[in-house]
Image (cartoon, rainbow, N blue to C red):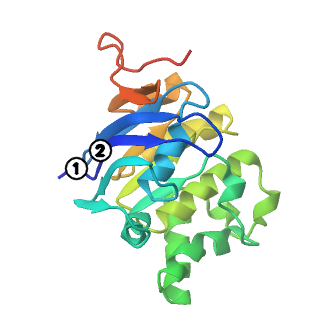
């Protein structure tokens, strides 16, 4: 069974021309689907539609075997699909790294002890224990990016949705991110302008152009942005 299936998605922001015109995709278990396209093509918008943060004007969103329409339909989707925003500051708002990572499990009803055990486990798995008690807003851009991923992994999602995950990462931290993601069992949708990053991670690519998702040239497995 597909984890996500989007079909005929149309969307436009108020007072702007529509940016999605019948876009569709299918995400199967185990896939790492890369989506590319020029700035403003609607890639981030598509991820937000997948978890119900934006609603299409037409089309269907099916997630985990069920069609999702109303706000309550997406509560389960947001528990099972972890969205890592393009800007880490949109996702980190607690005083310390540990508190940011514990927030999600606590919000789902975990006890304080259980939530802190999850914090220790995630930080250990990602080799980020040295950041545990750091003040979040004083982290570097790259550190914030990795902590943001940790906050999502703490929720133990079935799918990862990653919006430009290499933003603010230097070469060393990008290499660490690739290792971390390759070690995760989850299916992923990865929005990235970086062809090298996509080539190391992706199992399949689609390009968002003229409001639709299209297969790249079959002679070039990973399309390069222009």
Q: Earlier in the sequence, mark 2 or mark 1?
A: 1
User: Residue 128 at what x, y percent from top left?
Assistant: 61, 58
From the viewer's perspective, tell me whether residue 100 is left or right of residue 53: right
In this rendering, is residue 174 above or below 194?
below
User: Residue 135 at what x, y percent from top left?
Assistant: 79, 66
Q: Quadrant of the C terminus?
A: top right
From the viewer's perspective, tell me whether residue 17 is left or right of residue 74: right
Nearest the eye: 12 or 200: 12
Report, in whole angstroms, how far the alpha carbon at label 2 lies from the one at label 1. 6 Å
User: Residue 54 at what x, y percent from top left?
Assistant: 51, 54
The residue sitting at 60% across, 38% down in the picture is 166
Nearest the eye: 57 or 25: 57
In this rendering, is residue 113 above or below 100?
below
Instruction: Rate crowding at label 2 as few (under 14), some (14 to 19) or many (20 or more) other CA atoms within 10 Å.
Output: many
Q: Which residue is disc 1 drawn over?
A: 2
In this rendering, is residue 42 above or below 65?
above
Q: Answer whether residue 3 is visible to the viewer in this image.
A: yes
Nearest the eye: 70 or 209: 70
Kindly check if marks 2 and 1 are in contact, taking CB atoms under 8 A apart as contact.
yes
Instruction: Rate crowding at label 1 as few (under 14), some (14 to 19) or many (20 or more) other CA atoms within 10 Å.
Output: few
The residue sitting at 55% across, 53% down in the picture is 84
Q: Provide the secondary structure element on which disc 2 rests.
A: strand
Q: Which residue is disc 2 drawn over?
A: 27
Q: Answer whether residue 180 is visible to the viewer in this image.
A: no
Q: Provide the secondary structure element on which disc 1 rests.
A: loop
């Amino acid at each position: 069974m597909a984890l996500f299936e989007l079909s005929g998605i149309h969307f436009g922001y108020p007072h702007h021309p529509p940016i999605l015109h019948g876009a569709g995709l299918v995400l199967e278990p185990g896939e790492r689907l890369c989506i590319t396209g020029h700035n403003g093509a609607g890639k981030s918008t598509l991820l937000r539609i997948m978890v119900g943060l934006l609603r299409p004007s037409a089309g269907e969103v099916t997630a985990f075997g069920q069609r999702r329409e109303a706000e309550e339909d997406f509560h389960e989707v947001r528990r099972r699909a972890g969205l890592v925003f393009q800007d880490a500051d949109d996702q980190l708002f607690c005083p310390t790294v540990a508190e940011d990572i514990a927030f999600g499990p606590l919000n789902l009803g975990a006890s304080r002890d259980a939530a802190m055990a999850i914090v220790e486990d995630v930080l250990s798995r990602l080799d980020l224990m040295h950041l545990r008690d750091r003040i979040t807003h004083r982290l570097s851009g790259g550190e914030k990016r990795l902590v943001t991923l940790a906050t999502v992994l703490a929720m133990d999602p079935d799918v990862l949705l990653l919006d430009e995950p290499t933003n603010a990462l230097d070469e060393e931290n990008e290499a660490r991110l690739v290792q971390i993601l390759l070690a995760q069992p989850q299916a992923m949708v990865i929005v990235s302008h970086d062809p090298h990053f996509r080539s190391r991670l992706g199992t399949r690519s689609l390009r968002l152009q003229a409001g639709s998702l299209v297969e790249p040239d079959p002679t070039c497995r990973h399309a390069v942005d222009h």
